[in-house]
Image: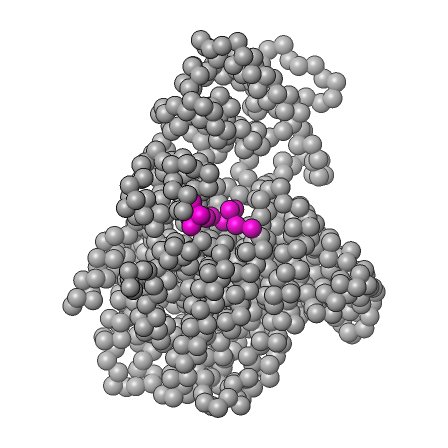
Amino acid sequence: MSRRSKSNDAINFLSNNSRIVLERRYLKKDQAGKVCESPEQMFRRVAAHIAQAEKNYDKKADLKAIEDKFYCLMSEFKFLPNSPTLMNAGRDLGQLAACFVLPVKDSINDIFEAVKNAATIHKSGGGTGFSFSRLRPENSRVGSTGGVASGPVSFMKIFNTATEQVKQGGTRRGANMAVLRVDHPDIMAFIKCKNNKAELNNFNISVGVTDKFMAAVQDEAEYDLIDPRNQEVSGRLNAMAVYQELVKQAWSTGDPGIIFLDEINRYNTTPGVGDIESTNPCGEQPLLPMEACNLGSINLTKFVIEKDGNPAIDYDSFKETIHLSVRFLDNTIDMSKYPLDEIALMVKSNRKIGLGIMGFADLLFMLNLPYDSNDAIDTAEQIMSFLQKESHAASCTLAKSRGNFLNFEHSIYKDDETGRMRNATTTTIAPTGTLSIIAGCSSGIEPAFALSFVRNVMDNDKLLEVNPVFERISKAKGFYSEELMEQVAENGTAKGNSHIPVALRTIFVTAHDIKPEVHIRMQAAFQRHTDNAVSKTVNLPHDATREDVKYIYDQAFKLKCKGVTIYRDGSKDNQVLSISGKENKDNSNDFLSAGQKRPSILEGFTQKIKTGMGYLYITVSEFNNRPFELFATIGKSGKSTMAKTEAIGRLISLALRSGVEVEEIIDQIKGIRGEHAVFQEGGLIYSIPDAIAKVLEKRYMVNGNGNTKKHPVNRLKSDVCPECGQTVAFEEGCMKCYACGFTKCS
């Protein structure tokens, strides 16, 4: 009874954000769209459904006792299964797996069969990965018709269009991964295929890199391109030139990523069944064609205890949770309704599961360890090696009573001394997306994206969200204030904030405080003890160079990661499209053309705003519903301040007339600190430039309070949430919004 009360207490302390995410995406709704299920009822529904698998192996099993264990596991937020399980378990749809890989064979019938199958999977709530490497290259002869082939990239667009039309599980569009081998003749077209940021938006893309290619890069040598129809050499390219183009595109757009095919297949647990050619959308789950995987994550923040006066990890409780979670996921395989018979057969033949973790960054906060320290990397190795060992032991124990997976004799385990394994794989570091919001912890193994942020609740209401560990410690140490948390929200980090003790500034580091090499070392530490792969994004600052990206890719290969994804801050901004449809290089198509005179009359607005230097008057003139000129004057201030204010206005006007987007101007001047900050409605005003930025933001940005319909040219950036307009994070190979819980992938 005490365990159930504890579970209820955990649910009662759900954050507002957790409740919003649950109501939007997980809880049952009636025909009118009204929520008709509580979080407690959801967990009970899932636990009861997954427990039903026990009767397949023990007719006398106490299903209620198992159900209660599963219920406590989830409702105490020690473990959560992947999103489709929470959404669909115990409901008509019944599809519980998150990750699928579908084959794409080289015939028109097979290609469109794959499109149909992908649509079916997306409708059920899953994401799909494809290798397009078997498709003949562009301009190849098509024997049956005498025509020429359009190539892999062309067919990817068909898959993308189909995805656009099918909402995933009724909540979001499906996510896809496209992989093309680096030795495919169309590899350069593939690498550049997301240059137009308006296309292939439902795809992540990764180049399938081989050891042979990386050796050729090292030697700056040429390598062979292989025609997939006959496996004959069809051409040669300079490996370094291809590699540099890959790096350039990743730096520019965030795509493509890399997967290391040979490294993946060195750890293929069922080599006798086939080679792995692709992964799921976020790259953490390499799978055979027609294979699926059920994932779940353990919340590490639930396993911190005090030992000898210091925080420590409770490995006994962690072990117990690992074994119960493996049982849960193995049951999930039996209780899922798979969208295709071929998938059901492959899944039940290999029984792959992927147990991972979330809350790692919060755990490090609780242990007083900076994410960018050697101690943190050592802790990662200890945790993941323990999880790997115990999950294998749990799978072995299940095999004693339930039997080995059917393809055991085609696996690497057939010569193992135990002679038993229930699941071909047991561990994965997967995106936790909305799951970590529900659990109230940090995502996966990523560093904290921000210690504090402001979430829009209603039209004019804002809610300050603070990392729970940071909030708890700041209150315990006596330096907490809402004003300070708002300052932290402005910058997303404690770095450089003199109101926070130096020692804590060192511990509470966030994603952009961390050097790229630390990101990749951390990923490698987890990968060394993971059956499948690791979903992680190496976040880079906007001013990172292409050489920085190349270094990350080089290090990922050297440290034996199975793949790598980078995101350079701001690199996914949508370009304004020109009328002709050609690439618009100056983004100025809506402004005056060269030599055209300024109109004698321009409409606009004037706003008065309080600053620490006096009242600031900002006048903005508009042309074609866009800001065109800005004039700023400061009242009752010295001549020097007045001159600087006028200069700022003139420079902003010059930038606006030159076609610079208002978003870029805001990014440059927002948050600049002066010597006299002042608090007014809407938050702190740090300086005159900061005041100008906030006026522009409120008027023109989607997440401001202005009339965005009046300013259609200021389009939503792709690093802004499409649902709530807040800034998104790029983590775990995916886009995630901390403000409303939107995610493209999990």
Determine whether, in the image, residue 51 is placed left or right of residue 626.
left
Q: Position of residue 234 (x, y in %)?
A: 83, 67
Q: Residue at x 40, y 76 (%)?
A: 390
Q: Quadrant of residue 454?
A: top left
Q: Position of residue 392 (x, y in %)?
A: 44, 79
Question: Can residue 145 be seen here?
Answer: no
Task: Residue 601: tell me if it is visible.
Answer: yes
Q: Quadrant of residue 301?
A: bottom left
Point 52% across, 85% down: residue: 413
Q: How many numbered marks appear?
A: 0
Rendering coords of residue 602 (x, y %): 58, 14
**Depth check, front residue: 543 or 681:** 543
User: Is residue 509 located in the magenta-colored stretch of the structure?
Assistant: yes
In depth, the one of 450 and 593 nearer the eye is: 450
On screen, residue 406 versus residue 517, left or right, reads left
**Magenta extent:** 505-515
Of all residues, the one furthest to the left in this rendering is: 1
What percent of the width, then of the height, locates residue 505? 42, 45
Question: In the orientation shown, which residue stands out farthest toward the front?
Answer: 308
109 is higher (above) or lower (below) than 575 = below
Image quarter (top left, top right, bottom left or bottom right) of the N terminus:
bottom left
Residue 241 found in image quarter = bottom right
Residue at position x 50%, y 60% in the image? 374
